Amino acid sequence: MPEGEIESIRALLGAKPRPVGWRERRRRIDEVGAVWPVSPDVRLQSVDVGGVPGEWSLVPGSEPSRVLLYFHGGGYCSGSIVSHRRLVTEAGRAGRLRTLAIEYRLAPEHPYPAALEDALVAWRWLRSQGIAAGHIVVGGDSAGGNLTLVLLDALREAGEALPACAWLLSPWTDLTMSGSTLATKDAVDPLIHKAYLEELAKAYLPVGMDASDWRVSPLRADLRGFPPVLVQVGSDETLLADATRFAEAAGAADVPVTLQVWPHMIHAWPMWNAGLEPGRRALADAGMFMRRHLQDDSL
């Protein structure tokens, strides 16, 4: 890794005081996520996904009949298509497929199950467009990784076909905050801390729902029958244990799971892929994983 790249990203993230309030937090994540613009060869198209806002992206040479359905992170309370546009479009390039980013509803205005309802609408809309389940990858970072897993469980319980595979980047899998690295990595993680996660969980959970419920903490779900999963996480993340414990649980449930722990990387580091070589390499690995599991040898 070129000297100073990850330190530059840390400096970017720490350049301003941590925002207070949902409006400012949403503005800030859009700001830092859009520091590097989308590459000029990316074609973007806004789309109404059954009433949920979405955005297609496609780069030259990619296969439009193969799709990455992506759910952004932000603790279920912030994040957007804008904040994650560079990440999503470059993931599409790496996977040589089209991407569909989803603007699901956010808490606290829209607590659980609003995000899951929007994810189900997006999946079913995509299938209604003639895209086979085996030609779809579902993925997300942080809370978007959580939503990916909850969607998979809902599809399996409904008896619907599952996607070819799933990609989880720095996933938040346990809203009870029981992971040991919330303490051991607190001093090195510039973004995610236990008190912040507790605030997010409180905003997302409806009255009467326990944080240990598998529908919001998929670490505790029955994972049997899930498609192959790639989990990527940085070694400097407080959510490291959320990723490693999920990978262990998935493996124990006979799910084909690949776990990558990237040294010195922070939460959702491929968001800054334009200025961070490990971010580009992580996306390249994710792209190879997607192509390997999509049902088309030509990819």
Image (cartoon, grey):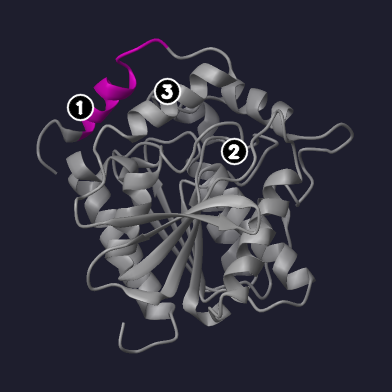
88, above or below 134, in the image: above
Magenta part mainly helix, strand or loop?
helix
Per the image, the residue denoted by label 2 is 179
Residue at 33% of width from left, 55% of height from top?
A: 89
Q: Amino acid at mark 2?
A: Gly
Q: CA distance from mark 1 to mark 2?
A: 28 Å
Per the image, the residue denoted by label 3 is 28
| Disc 1 element | helix
Residue at 40% of width from left, 10% of height from top?
A: 17
Task: Tell me the quarter of the picture where residue 1 sits.
Answer: top left
Q: Earlier in the sequence, mark 3 or mark 1?
A: 1
**Bounds of the magenta segment:** 6-17
Crowd tier of the residue under label 2, counting other residues whose Cα lies within 10 Å: few below 14, some 14–19, many 20 or above: many
Tell which of 41 and 187 is nearer to you: 41
Per the image, the residue denoted by label 1 is 8
Q: Amino acid at mark 3?
A: Arg
Q: Earlier in the sequence, mark 1 or mark 2?
A: 1
Q: CA distance from mark 3 to mark 2?
A: 27 Å
